Image (tube, grey):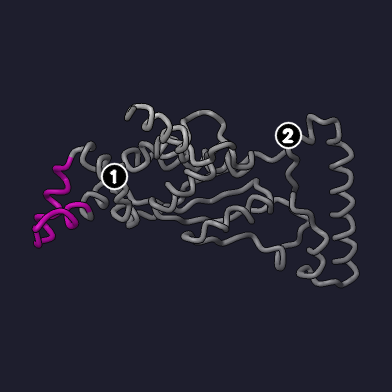
C-alpha cells in the first residue's frame, strides 16, 4: 500500500493581502492602488473571515496553489480531474514504461485476507504488460492491460475558491478513502501558508454548518431537512 505524498510547490506568499486588496476594491470607493493596498494591510483577520463566510469567494480566487501529488492510484486521478476548475499534468502511461510503476492495495483487501491473491493477480498483469512491450506493442496500447490500481503522480493547481469547494466534497466521510486522504493532506498544506483563507475549510458541514447528504449523512452535522424541522418547531 503506497503512502500518499503531497507537496505544496508554489503558493502566494501574501495570500491574505491579495484577498484583502480584492475585498477593498469591491467594497470601497477608493481608486488609487497604493491607498487600496494601505487599507488592505490594515484589515484584521475578522474582516476577511466575515467576507469568506458570507460566500463572497471571488476575492480569494486570485490565489493559486500548486501541488505535487504521488503515491495515488488511477482511480483517484479519475475522481480528481472531475474538479474542472483546476489544472492537471499527469504522469503518462503512453511515454513512461509501466514496469517502473507500483500499485495501490486498499486496506479492505488487506484486512480481508485476500491481499496475497490480489497482488499476485496484479503482478500477472504487469508481467503480461512487459511481455507485450517486449513483443513490440507500443506502450500506449500495452497500457490497456494495466489495472486502475496502478500508481501515478500529478501536478495539480487550483485557486483558493476551487480548493474550498474541493475540500467540501472530498474531505467528507462520503468520499472514498483514498481521495479523502489526499484532500485532507492538501488542506493541511494550505492551512500552513494561508490559515485565514482556509480557517473553516474542510468537509461541506465544516464550512457551511450543515450536511447536504440528508438520509446518507454520517451524523456529524444536522442536515438541511433537520434544520428546517427545528426552524418550523421554533415558529410554533
Q: Which mark is residue 107?
A: 2
Q: How many marks?
A: 2
Crowding around mark 2 (Cα neighbors within 10 Å: few <14, some 14 to 19, many 20+) is: few
> Where is residue 69 drawn, in percent x and y?
57, 49
> Where is residue 73 drawn, in percent x and y?
68, 49
Q: Check disc 2 and report its element: helix, strand or loop.
A: helix
Helix, strand or loop: magenta stretch: helix
Tell whether label 2 touches label 1 (CB within 8 Å): no
Quarter location, residue 81: bottom right
71 left or right of 203?
right
The residue at 17%/52% (across/down) is: 24
Task: Read off the residue under disc 1.
Answer: 54
Q: Residue 69 lies in magenta, yes or no?
A: no
The residue at 21%/52% (across/down) is: 23
The answer, for residue 94, to whether it is visible in the render is yes
> Where is residue 174 drawn, in percent x and y?
59, 39
59 left or right of 67?
left
- Please, is residue 143 above or below residue 50 in the view? below
Mark 1 vs mark 2: give the one in front.
1
Residue at the front extreme?
236
The answer, for residue 188, to whether it is visible in the render is no
The residue at 78%/54% (across/down) is: 147
Q: What range of the chain is rendered magenta?
A: 23-43
> Where is residue 17 drawn, in percent x and y?
24, 48
The residue at 30%/45% (across/down) is: 52
Crowding around mark 1 (Cα neighbors within 10 Å: few <14, some 14 to 19, many 20+) is: few
Q: Check disc 1 and report its element: helix, strand or loop.
A: loop
Q: CA distance from mark 1 to mark 2?
A: 39 Å
Q: Residue 41 lies in magenta, yes or no?
A: yes
* Label located before the other in sequence (1 or 2): 1
Q: Quadrant of the C terminus?
A: top left
Amino acid at each position: 500500500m503506497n503512502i500518499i505524498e503531497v507537496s505544496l510547490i508554489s503558493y502566494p506568499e501574501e495570500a491574505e493581502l491579495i484577498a484583502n486588496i480584492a475585498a477593498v476594491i469591491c467594497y470601497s470607493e477608493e481608486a488609487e492602488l497604493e491607498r487600496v493596498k494601505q487599507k488592505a494591510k490594515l484589515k484584521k483577520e475578522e474582516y476577511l473571515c466575515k467576507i469568506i463566510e458570507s460566500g463572497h469567494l471571488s476575492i480569494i480566487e486570485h490565489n493559486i496553489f500548486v501541488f505535487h501529488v504521488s503515491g495515488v492510484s488511477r482511480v483517484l486521478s479519475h475522481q480528481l480531474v472531475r474538479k474542472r476548475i483546476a489544472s492537471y499534468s499527469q504522469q503518462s502511461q503512453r511515454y513512461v514504461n509501466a514496469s517502473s510503476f507500483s500499485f495501490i492495495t486498499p486496506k479492505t483487501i488487506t484486512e480481508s485476507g485476500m491481499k496475497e491473491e490480489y497482488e499476485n493477480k496484479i503482478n500477472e498483469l504487469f508481467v503480461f504488460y512487459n511481455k507485450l512491450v517486449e513483443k513490440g506493442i507500443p506502450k500506449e496500447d500495452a497500457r490497456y492491460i494495466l489495472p486502475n490500481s496502478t500508481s501515478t503522480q500529478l501536478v495539480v493547481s487550483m485557486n483558493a475558491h476551487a480548493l474550498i469547494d474541493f475540500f467540501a466534497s472530498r474531505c467528507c466521510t462520503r468520499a472514498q478513502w483514498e481521495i479523502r486522504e489526499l484532500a485532507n493532506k492538501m488542506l493541511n498544506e494550505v492551512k500552513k501558508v494561508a490559515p485565514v483563507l482556509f480557517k473553516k475549510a474542510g468537509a461541506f458541514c465544516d464550512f457551511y454548518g450543515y450536511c447536504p447528504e440528508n438520509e446518507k449523512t454520517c451524523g456529524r452535522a444536522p442536515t438541511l431537512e433537520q434544520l428546517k424541522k427545528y426552524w418550523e418547531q421554533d415558529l410554533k
